[in-house]
Amino acid sequence: MGTWITALVPIKDPEGDELIAVLGIDTDARGWKTMIVHSVLPPALLTLLLIAIILIGIILLRRRFRQEGQPAYWMSHIELELAAAGGLVMTLFAVWAAHHNEHYARNEMFAQTVTSQTSVIAERLLMWSSKSGHPVKQL
């Protein structure tokens, strides 16, 4: 019951490049949707945090310029504080992006390894087919 995502991978003859079989897997869509949310959340949070920093900066700068007399010490250096907050947010996002890219590269390497191993599976299917007298059905 529920929603499922299906992935299919062809298993090809390494010599003739003909399709021998199709390997499939079904996965629950909830996990897939969670993965999408986890991918979208950091850039959305970055955007919201930068907008918040800009809006807070505008409000504080207007308040400082409207204020008569000497502003509070922390308010006299508000530009530096806003730049530091923006820099911190962007640095945290850069760290997340580097981690995310490393994770993606690791998954790509795994996919390439799996793809290279399909030739071994194809060879074994062909050997089984020839020994058992059960031909592998061509699609």
Image: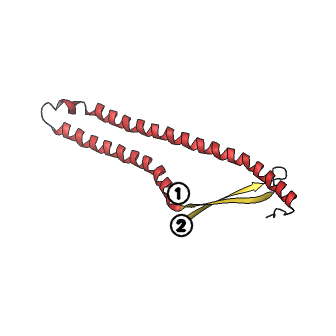
Taking the spot 62% from the left edge, 44% from the top edge, the residue there is: 108
| Residue positioned most to the bottom | 1
Give the spatial CA distance, label 1 vs label 2: 10 Å
**Going 73% across and 46% down the picture, which residue do you hit?**
116
Q: Residue at x 57, y 44 (%)?
A: 104
**Which residue is at the front of the view, 39 or 48?**
39
Residue 94 left/right relative to 84: right
- Kind of residue at disc 1: Trp
User: Counting other residues with Cα less than 10 Å from the Cα at mark 2, is it few (<14), some (14-19), or many (20 or more)?
Assistant: few
Q: Secondary structure at mark 2?
A: loop
Q: State the image quarter where residue 54 is shown.
A: top left
Reply above or below: 16 against 4: above
Question: Split into 4 quadrants, where in the image is the C terminus?
Answer: bottom right
| Residue drawn at 55 percent across, 42 percent down | 103
Give the residue at mark 2: 3
Q: Kindly identify which numbered label has been placed on residue 32.
A: 1
Which x, y percent locates residue 62?
22, 41
Amino acid type assigned to the residue bearing label 2 in the image:
Thr
